[in-house]
Amino acid sequence: MPIEGTVFHVEPMVYPIPLRFLEFQRSEDGLGSVTFEALASARPERWHELLAEAQAVWDWVRTHAPGPQGPLDDGGTWDGELAVTEEPDGWRSLAMTLCGDAVFAAWFDQAFGAAGGGDGAVAASRTLR
């Protein structure tokens, strides 16, 4: 369904790498902002694979996303962050959050097949053993 009053072109989807570890969940705030979250954990010997996938997603979004990156309140159409935590046993977790307006959300849904619905409280989680 087109977004009323919005015209945008989505290029054919050419992914940087297939998504094997990150699975994005979508939530909406009711005010026009949409958030996509993914959470994954890996052992030290698999960490580089997870990190490479997250970096590829980030680079692809920065290169192809419609509109400027930046806080939505400051005129950006999308923004994001990446957080990494390390556990005492060497496992690492990566959380990627991307948020944007309706145009960005439609583009991201098409590009990465984000899941719809959900309460937005918990992102999908994958563990790399």
Image (cartoon, helix red, strand yellow):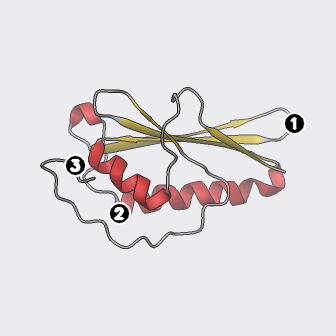
Q: Quadrant of residue 53?
A: bottom right
Q: Is residue 125 left or right of residue 129?
A: left
The 10 Å Cα crowd at callout 3, few under 14, some 14 to 19, many 20 or more, is: few
Is 70 on the left or on the right of 61, as rendered?
Answer: left
Mark 2 Cα shell of 10 Å, populated few (<14), some (14-19), many (≥20): some
Q: Give the label on residue 64, or none.
A: 2
Residue in the foreground of this view, choosing between 62 and 31: 31
- Distance from disc 3 to disc 1, alpha carbons, whole Å, reads 47 Å
Q: Residue at x 22, y 34 (%)?
A: 74
Three-letter residue code for mark 1:
Asp
Q: Nearer the viewer, mark 2 or mark 3?
A: 3
Q: Earlier in the sequence, mark 3 or mark 1?
A: 3
Residue at the (25%, 42%) spot, across then down: 76
- The disc at residue 3 is 3
Front residue of 20/110: it is 110
Q: Is the residue marked by circle 1 packed among few (<14), some (14-19), or many (20+) residues within 10 Å? A: few
Q: Are marks 2 and 1 in contact (CB under 8 Å)?
A: no
Q: Are marks 3 and 1 in contact (CB under 8 Å)?
A: no
Work out how far the residue at label 2 is from the one at label 1, CA to CA, in angstroms. 37 Å
Q: Nearer the viewer, mark 2 or mark 1?
A: 2
Placement of 52 over or under 22, stated as above or below: below
Residues tagged 2 and 3 counted as in contact (Cβ below 8 A): no
Percent of width and height locating residue 39: 63, 41
Q: To which quarter of the image does residue 126 belong? A: top right
Disc 2 marks a residue whose amino acid type is His
**Dot placed on the residue nearer the N-terminal end, 2 or 1:** 2
Q: Position of residue 67 (x, y in %)?
A: 25, 53
Residue under circle 1? 89
Q: Amino acid at mark 3?
A: Ile
For discs 3 and 1, the disc positioned in front in the rendered view: 3
Left or right of 47? Residue 54 is: left
Name above or below for residue 98 compared with residue 18. above
